[in-house]
Image (cartoon, rainbow, N blue to C red):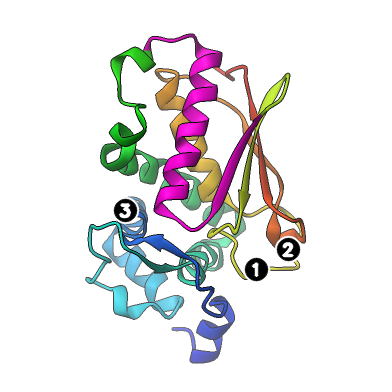
């Protein structure tokens, strides 16, 4: 069991920036789905978030889950399961989180419409990525923008909850964001997989977290 000092090390100071309760809830449910009840409770204990054990945030749109707590969850996965295992867990949690958020917010931005599903893939990706950015701007105080490049899309996140308060890391660490994008693209394309790579990360000292989304599917 970690000490209070360890917990303080994992948690950055309160940011004043928040995810909605629903976003936090579905993230915790996704981690539980992957790691089991004991696994998610271990992460919550390790990160000093014991008040959330059997007490997930309510299913509402109030922005009340501080970025520092979300970042601590991601770091807890890394500390408990190791860099590789934590990465896999965070990617899977991101994918599962997208599926839950789509049910709640998809209709609000039109990505659940049949007409949208029938447009050409490149157009669908452009519309869909911007719709996803709109959703995440709604459910979080992060600021997200999408830029269309000739060969790929740039997905830029300022004030990123996944790495909030982290610094001096040597590789990008926002794996849940990658998982969210991968699953969103899989859904948009009726099952195709796309390469999503984080090329800049706030925790590395960059001014934003920047993700490159290839326009051609991997398979």
Q: Dot 2 lies on which element? A: loop
Q: Dot 1 lies on which element? A: loop
Q: Which label sits on residue 26? A: 3
* Number of other residues with Cα within 10 Å of mark 2, as a class: few under 14, some 14 to 19, many 20 or more: few
- In the figure, is residue 100 to the left or right of 165? left
Q: Which residue is drawn at the image coordinates 56% and 25% (left, top)? A: 194
User: Would you place residue 36 above or below residue 133 in this image?
Assistant: below
- In the figure, is residue 200 to the left or right of 109? right
Q: Dot 3 lies on which element? A: helix
From mark 2 to mark 1, how far is it between C-alphas?
A: 7 Å
**Magenta span of residues:** 118-147
Quadrant containing the C terminus is: top right
Sequence-earlier tag: 3 or 1: 3
Q: Are marks 2 and 1 in contact (CB under 8 Å)?
A: yes
Quarter-of-image position of residue 39: bottom left
Residue tagged by mark 2?
A: 169
Q: Position of residue 179 (x, y in %)?
A: 50, 42
Residue tagged by mark 1?
A: 166
Residue 131 on the magenta segment:
yes
Residue 106 on the magenta segment:
no
Q: Which label sits on residue 99? A: none
From mark 3 to mark 1, how far is it between C-alphas?
A: 23 Å
Residue 83 is at least partly visible in this image: yes
Quadrant containing the N terminus is: bottom left
User: Would you place residue 10 above or below residue 56 in this image?
Assistant: below
Q: What secondary structure prevails in the magenta region? A: helix
From mark 3 to mark 2, how far is it between C-alphas?
A: 27 Å
Camera-side residue of 81 and 131: 131
Residue 193 is at least partly visible in this image: no
- In the figure, is residue 112 to the left or right of 78? left
């Amino acid at each position: 069991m970690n000490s209070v000092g360890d917990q303080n090390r994992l948690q950055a100071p309160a940011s004043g920036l928040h995810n909605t309760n629903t976003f936090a809830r579905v993230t915790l449910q996704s981690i539980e789905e992957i790691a089991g009840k004991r696994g998610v409770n271990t992460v919550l204990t390790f990160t000093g978030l014991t008040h959330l054990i059997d007490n997930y945030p309510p299913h509402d749109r109030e922005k009340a889950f501080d970025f520092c707590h979300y970042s601590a969850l991601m770091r807890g996965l890394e500390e408990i399961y190791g860099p590789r295992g934590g990465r896999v867990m965070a990617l899977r949690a991101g994918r599962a989180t997208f599926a839950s958020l789509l049910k709640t917010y998809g209709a609000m931005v039109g990505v659940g419409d049949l007409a949208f599903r029938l447009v050409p893939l490149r157009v669908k990706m452009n519309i869909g990525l911007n719709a996803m950015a709109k959703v995440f701007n709604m459910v979080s105080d992060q600021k997200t923008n999408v830029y269309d490049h000739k060969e790929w899309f740039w997905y830029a996140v300022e004030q990123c909850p996944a790495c909030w308060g982290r610094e001096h890391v040597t590789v990008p660490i926002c794996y849940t964001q990658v998982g969210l994008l991968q699953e969103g693209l899989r859904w948009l394309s009726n099952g195709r997989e796309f390469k999503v790579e984080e090329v800049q990360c706030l925790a590395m000292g960059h001014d934003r977290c920047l993700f490159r989304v290839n326009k051609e599917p991997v398979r």
